[in-house]
């Protein structure tokens, strides 16, 4: 067993020990924290449900494949291999869907190929934007489109730069 795997249990024991030393009522503090988490969970749930349903529909309907085919010339112009275009489209919506696409790309082209490296960088340099924004908008008083546009632009810029750098690696 590696020592790194002991960090979290040791941290837990240290916090537990300090709380006992300071005579903190651990169970009461824990239940208070859970009580505060329930309203947050209830406010986030509608956004998360909508994102999960829409991401499933986006992939299952074939819309993502059609959009990827339509954007292939644009991707090629920007230096993104067209083979990873479905991954680039699905990643902002679904982490598990993009993981499945990444596995398919690795199986088809290999992890050490240019396409495999670009796919890995695209996967690692982007985020499930709409999932994160669902959490953000659940707590935000004003819901605007600007954070969505900025996050999507940053994701896409990361993919372009990553694929460009993969040419030299």
Image: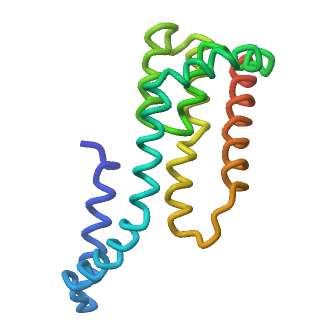
Image quadrant assignment for residue 15: bottom left
Residue, far right: 77
Residue farthest left in this picture: 27
Query: Percent position (x, y) of residue 3?
Result: 31, 49
Is residue 97 depicted above or below 68 in this figure? below
Q: In the figure, is residue 67 to the left or right of 90?
A: right
Residue projecting furthest to the bottom: 23
Write down the quadrant of residue 18 in the picture: bottom left
Q: Residue at x 43, y 20 (%)?
A: 103
Question: Which is more toward the observer, 124 or 98?
Answer: 98
Position of 50 compared to 74: left or right? left
Count every numbered label the image shows and give the total. Answer: 0
**Which residue is drawn at the image coordinates 41% and 41% (left, top)?**
53
Q: Is 68 displayed left or right of 50 in the figure? A: right
Q: Residue at point 75% right, 23% down?
A: 164
Residue lying farthest top?
Answer: 108
Q: Position of residue 135 (x, y in %)?
A: 50, 59
| Position of residue 45 measured from the top left corner of the image (x, y, whole percent) | 39, 59
What residue is at 50 percent from the left and 65 percent from the top?
Answer: 138
Residue 56 point in image, percent of width and height = 42, 34
Figure quadrant of the C terminus: top right
Instruction: Name the image quarter holding the N terminus.
Output: top left
Look at the picture and state if 169 lies above or below 149: above
Protein image colouring: rainbow
Q: Nearer the viewer, residue 18 or 92?
A: 92
Q: Is residue 28 above or below residue 54?
A: below
Q: Is residue 164 left or right of residue 110?
A: right
In the rendered image, the vertical position of residue 112 relative to residue 99, given as above or below: above
């Amino acid at each position: 067993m590696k020592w790194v795997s002991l960090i979290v249990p040791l941290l837990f024991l240290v916090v537990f020990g300090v709380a006992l030393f300071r005579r903190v009522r651990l169970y009461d503090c824990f239940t208070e924290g859970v009580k505060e988490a329930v309203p947050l969970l209830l406010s986030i749930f509608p956004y998360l449900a909508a994102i999960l349903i829409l991401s499933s529909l986006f992939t299952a309907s074939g819309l993502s494949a059609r959009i990827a085919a339509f954007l292939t010339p644009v991707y090629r112009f920007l230096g993104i291999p067209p083979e990873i275009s479905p991954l680039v489209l699905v990643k902002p919506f679904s982490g598990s869907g993009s993981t499945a696409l990444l596995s398919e790309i690795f199986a088809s082209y290999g992890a050490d190929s240019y396409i495999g490296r670009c796919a890995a960088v695209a996967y690692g340099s982007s985020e499930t934007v709409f999932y994160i924004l669902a959490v953000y908008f659940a707590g935000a008083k004003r819901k605007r489109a600007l954070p969505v546009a900025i996050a999507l632009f940053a994701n896409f810029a990361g993919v372009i730069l990553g694929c460009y750098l993969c040419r030299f690696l």
